[in-house]
Image (cartoon, grey):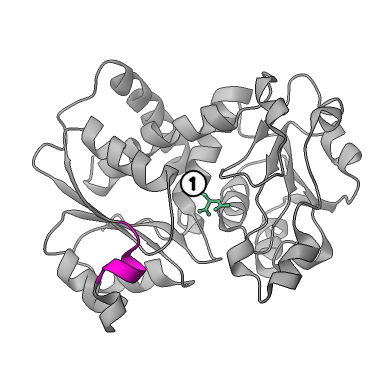
Amino acid sequence: MKHVISAQHFDRSELLALLQKAQTMLQVKEMGGADTLRGKIMAALFFEPSTRTRLSFESAMMRLGGNVISTENAREFSSAIKGETLEDTIRVVSGYADVIVLRHHEIGAGARAAHVSSVPVLSAGDGAGEHPTQALLDLFTIHQEIGRVEDLTVTLIGDLLYGRTVHSLVYILSQFKGIRLICTAPAATSLPSDVLAYATARGVVVEQEPDLARALQSADVVYQTRVQKERFASSEEYEKNKAAYVIDQTAMTYLPPHAILMHPLPRAGEIAPVVDADPRAAYFRQSHYGVPVRMALLLRAFGQ
Ligand code: NCD
């Protein structure tokens, strides 16, 4: 079954094929959609908040002619509150839908769901673990905006410890040649050692650069992230680390003209709104690429 659980499961050739498929889906979407998944049902089961991921998956399914059943806030409003296990919920929902999109607060939830599901499970984030479909749309954004996915310097800023989109993006970039990562984060939110080891074992050059101006100067891509308030042990810990690095107009003067500024969104103060008008600010375009990329992933789930 074509589950999407970890970004580690995609090799280079599959990633390149997905980029191509997403490119086709961008055209299909612009032409008014298709009927390819008519009669199919996607269940969106979200145990954590979401705007982009859930709505872009639902939009993607509908653009392909499919139907959607959806529960947001499943932690409170599904039978989880009555004590139902994730496994039981998945066993039941896989009888109602042909594909399940799952966001959950526990690391490993996607893998647990896939283990018991009779239909493909697409993880939409498992706690502080991974967010593979976001990383795929991030890769697509880099491809669209920069024109290549190799020989790139990517500066990762913010919460590299709890930021699941960062982990998945590092796994995906590690499949390509000539990748240099510059990590700009407080020590308390630096990249987990297993993610770092995965990248370096695959030839990625990883550098630590606490100075924001220097980290921006050599970047092709800047990937700013939100400090993940909900993952910290205490609010004091969060307060100490929040907004350590803010991209404002002054910071943008260090960014090369050809470079782009990405962010998975939502932002919480780490990119000043005044930056939005800069053509290098790619984050809203990035959010829109969620639809064609998820169309491609849904087709893949159905073997197409
Ligand atoms: C991210 C997430 O949920 O991990 N959002 C998203 O899906 N675009 C990033 C975040 O919450 O900071």
Residue indicated by mark 1:
134
Q: Residue at x 72, y 37 (%)?
A: 222
Quadrant position of residue 280 = top right
Residue 248 lies in magenta, yes or no? no
Q: Is residue 200 visible?
A: yes
Q: Residue at x 66, y 76 (%)?
A: 233
* Above-or-below relation of 58 to 255: below
Q: Is residue 199 left or right of residue 4?
A: right
Q: Give the residues in magenta.
A: 72-78
Q: Residue at x 40, y 71 (%)?
A: 109
Q: Is residue 84 visible?
A: no
Q: Is residue 59 left or right of residue 250?
A: left
Q: Secondary structure at mark 1?
A: helix
Residue 190 at x, y percent in the picture: 76, 62
Q: Residue at x 89, y 37 (%)?
A: 213
Identify which amino acid the numbered label 1 is placed on. Answer: Gln
Quarter of the image where the N terminus is located: bottom left
Q: Is residue 176 left or right of residue 15?
A: right
Q: Is residue 268 left or right of residue 106?
A: right
Q: Is the residue indicated by label 1 positioned so its CB lies within 8 Å of ligand 1?
A: yes
Q: Residue placed farthest to the top in the image?
A: 31
